[in-house]
Amino acid sequence: MVLSVVSILLISCSEEEPTGPPQVFNVEYDGFLQLRFTNEFPSFDETTQVDVHIDKYGKVTFGTGTLSYNADENNGQSRIVRVGTLSLNPKGSHFVSNGDDYVDVDENTTIVENMIVYYWDGQSWVEFVNENINSTWNGGLGFNIDDAVLTGSILQSVTAWGSTTWGLYLVVIP
């Protein structure tokens, strides 16, 4: 009798299927993450975007993209030339804060730029600085999913390289 009970318990335990991650949403989301990168001197204003998908389990998947800029401007006393490329390879995850759903985005954006600064000596432009810049942005961005669906969830910041405006725009996939 005891052997029968133990056998039944072992069989019922071994037939349980492994469980996956819990379902977070009743819908999925598709859309894009947009980056607008601007600067005043020298002046440039460039925008790019990468695809994003959020599944019912809260898994966030991004595409990749690039943004290039080329600016050459002077104010009569100084001249700045900036040529660069941003490579976007964001990573993201779902989280809940105060009952609201968010997407945490690690920008994982690499900046490669050459900046040359000249000054006017009264006769010609004299090179003062010629600098290659290689850096990565990994600050982390938190976007509200409800806002991203309604009007877009927007975050802005000013960096040493210029102003950035990040936007997450989503549509519901039933």
Image: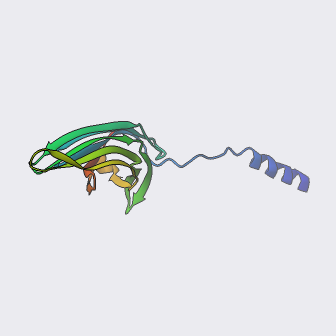
Q: Quadrant of the N terminus?
A: bottom right
Residue 97 in view of the camera: yes
How many numbered marks are there?
Answer: 0
Q: For this rendering, which residue is in front, 162 or 121?
A: 121
Identify the coloring: rainbow
Residue 26, position as x, y percentages in the image: 43, 43
Query: Measuring 24% from the left and 38% from the top, which residue is drawn there?
Result: 70
Where is residue 28? Give x, y as percent: 41, 40
Q: Which residue is more in the foreground, 17 or 58?
A: 58
Residue 171 coordinates in the image, percent (x, y): 32, 39
**Point 70% across, 46% down: residue:** 16
Outermost residue, bottom side? 98
Give the side of residue 31 with respect to residue 123, left or right: right
Q: Quadrant of residue 156?
A: bottom left
Q: Which residue is drawn at 85% across and 54% down?
A: 6
Can residue 1 be seen at all in this image of the molecule? no
* In-front residue for pair 84/65: 84
Q: Locate the C terminus and report the quarter of the image it occupies.
A: top left
Which percent across, then down, holds residue 95?
43, 55
- Picture quadrant of residue 149: top left
- Decide if residue 27 is on the left or right side of residue 69: right
State the residue in front, 131 or 3: 131
